[in-house]
Amino acid sequence: MNIAEPATEPTRAPTQDECTWGMVAHLSALGFFILPFGNIIGPLVVWLAKRDHSAFVGLHAKEALNFNITILMGALVCGVLLVFSIGILFGAVLFVFWFVLTIIAALKANEGATYRYPFTVRLVK
């Protein structure tokens, strides 16, 4: 494999360091609580920094990035639906969905397993 090419598929079992970075890729989305768009910036930084070094970390970071972009799109829809007051309910459900799946994905990454978020638009290939 050429160093300049991004890794695409893990070909071996991930090391503990790779598992930790995979978990960090998902948990970095919790940066949402610190900065605006932190849920996008965190996984993006991990993906850009680690995608060439580890296929496992690259896949987890890309998956986290795609999921958080999808959640952002859902949040924008909820914002529009605030006009009809239903956006508050949908926003609360979306927040719980985001938080729970982020934790589940982080735990799976830490176990060395791959994880695909459901209902995710995969914009980053």
Image (cartoon, rainbow, N blue to C red):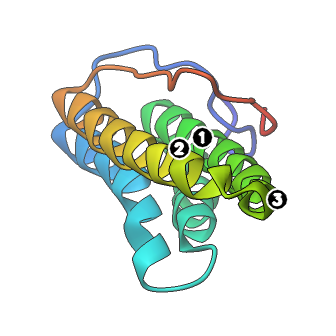
Q: Are marks 1 and 2 in contact (CB under 8 Å)?
A: yes
Q: Mark number for residue 18?
A: none
- The residue lying toward the viewer, choosing from 106 and 33, is 33
Crowding near the residue tagged with mark 2, few <14, some 14–19, many ≥20 C-alpha atoms within 10 Å: many
Read off the residue under disc 1. 67
Which of the two marks, 1 or 2, is nearer to us in this view? 1
Residue at the disc numbered 3: 80
Residues at marks 1 and 2, CA–CA distance in whole angstroms: 5 Å
Q: Provide the residue designation for mark 2.
A: 64
Q: Disc 3 or 2, which lies upstream in sequence? A: 2
Identify the amino acid type marked 1: Phe
User: Image height check: is 101 above or below 85?
Assistant: above
Q: Is residue 103 above or below residue 8?
A: below
Of 1 and 48, nearer the camera is: 48
**Which is more foreground, mark 1 or mark 3?**
3
Q: Quadrant of the C terminus?
A: top right
Horizontal relation, residue 71 to residue 76: left or right: left
Residue 62 lies, with reference to residue 111, above or below; the image says below
The spot of residue 94 in percent (x, y) is 51, 45
Residue 124 placement: quadrant: top right
Q: Is 61 left or right of 16, judged from the image as shown?
A: right
Type of residue at label 3?
Answer: Val
Q: CA distance from mark 1 to mark 3?
A: 20 Å
Identify the residue at horizontal 81%, vertical 36% (top origin).
Answer: 123
Q: Residues within 10 Å of mark 1 (few under 14, many from 20)?
A: many
* SS of the residue under disc 1: helix
Residue 68 versus residue 34 in the image, above or below: above
Q: Residue 98 in the image: state x and y as whole percent.
A: 45, 45
Amino acid on which the number 2 mark rests in the picture: Ala
The residues tagged by marks 3 and 2 sit, at their Cα atoms, a distance apart of: 25 Å
Say what secondary structure mark 2 lies in: helix
Q: Which corner quadrant of the image does residue 79 belong to?
A: bottom right
